[in-house]
Amino acid sequence: MQLFGSDRVAKVMDKLNFEEGEVITHSWITKSLERAQTKVEQNNFSIRKKQLEYDDVLSNQRDVIYERRRHALSGDQLRSDIYDMLEDLVETEVEQVYKTDDFEELYERILRFLAIDIELEPDEMKQMSEDELIDHIIEKAFDAYRKKEEMIAQPLFEVIKNIEESDAEEKPERVQVIFTDGMRRIPVVVDVEDALENEGSEVVRALERTAVLSTIDTKWMEHLRELDAVKGGIGLRSFAQKDPLLEYKREAFDMFMQLIEELNRETISMIWKAIPEMQADQQLQQAQEQKAKVDINKAKTEHSDSTNMGFSGGNAQQNGNSKSNGHQQRSDEKPQPVTVEKEPGRNDYVKVQNMNSGEVADIKWKKAKRMIEKDGWMLIEK
């Protein structure tokens, strides 16, 4: 009655001076209460209706996201969803590059997101139509993914097969495989029976499910928090003579389209780039061994080409023996750079010689070092 009752009823109640707890049976009071109750219900209905309109925006988005999540949980249409996400990602990137005409950036972004080489130069991309370029990138991505699936499935199938054939009394029904995309560790649970039936392909299917579910869960929660923040302040748009509901629908749609784009990009990137951690360690070890082998060969080459200065190994003894036998180094032989053991001070004077002209100069080491590295000089005396 204080909010929705009339002022006339309040004045009448004051004049009659009723005592506390006294029963009031007058028809005026009854009708006033009925009218106030009607206004209360109408106001509450209006609030619920407006809230429902806001909730319908989120409900439509929730249907799309939850449908993807159900496909990932059940496995139905999951591959189809992944291929659709790949096509959407490639189409978005190609459309963007045709607007900016920066085809080198397209090559780098495809390499960053999918870890594949599209084997096209920027000039070749410019000569292709937009649809041809999209089809080419998708075909390369599918080929790379099929090869990766074979590379992952076979070794893990052998491991699971050995577990199943072992004499252990309690054999695991599920095994966990740790994947990595170079930035994060992704634990994937694989059903042993399914992996044996499809010869290890279940490992890749489990990776796909995990990638879709983890990305959706993370991004969807962030999206809900952002929508709540927008909804909390959208009512202020009414001061600018704008309908808050229409503004909320517009912003929610833009945010949802951005969410879908991020879901596609992160999910596809995780699936295409992730490999089992043990294989990643092997690749890293092979790369380090290859690098170490190159460094050793380079060091041997520099050692064999250097003079005795700064070294006390076999070459120095060999040079000493050659001098004792009277075999002098040919004067017309092109001198080689000398690698010294201890670097002179910046302001120490050293003697350097130009390898092409034979010119000799006494200069400070800070200037001589730059000449040795860039201009073809060598250190002959420090």
Image: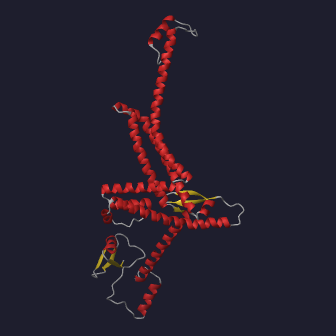
Q: Is residue 38 above or below residue 239?
A: above
Q: Is residue 292 visible?
A: yes
Q: Residue furthest right?
A: 169
**Does 64 appear above or below 102?**
above
Residue at 30 percent across and 65 percent down: it is 123
Q: Nearer the viewer, residue 177 or 254?
A: 254
- State the image quarter where residue 255 is shown: top left
Q: Quadrant of residue 162?
A: bottom right
Q: Is residue 79 left or right of residue 136?
A: right
> For residue 320, what is the image quadrant?
bottom left
Q: Residue furthest top?
A: 16
Residue 115 location (% of width, % of height): 44, 62
Q: Residue furthest bottom?
A: 325
Say which of 306 and 256 sits in front: 256
Who is closer to the viewer here, 125 or 77?
Answer: 77
Task: Name the spot of residue 226 as percent of width and height, x first.
Answer: 45, 42
Residue shown at 36%/57% (left/top)?
94
Residue 364 visible somewhere in the drawing: no
Q: Is residue 317 above or below residue 269?
A: below
Indicate the position of residue 338 as horizontal and vertical percent values. 38, 79
Q: Position of residue 193 (x, y in %)?
A: 63, 60
**Where, quadrant-wise, is the C terminus in this rendering?**
bottom left
Given residues 186 and 246, the one toward you in this image is 246
Q: Residue at x 45, y 54 (%)?
A: 84
207 to the left or right of 357 = right
Q: Coloured how?
A: secondary structure
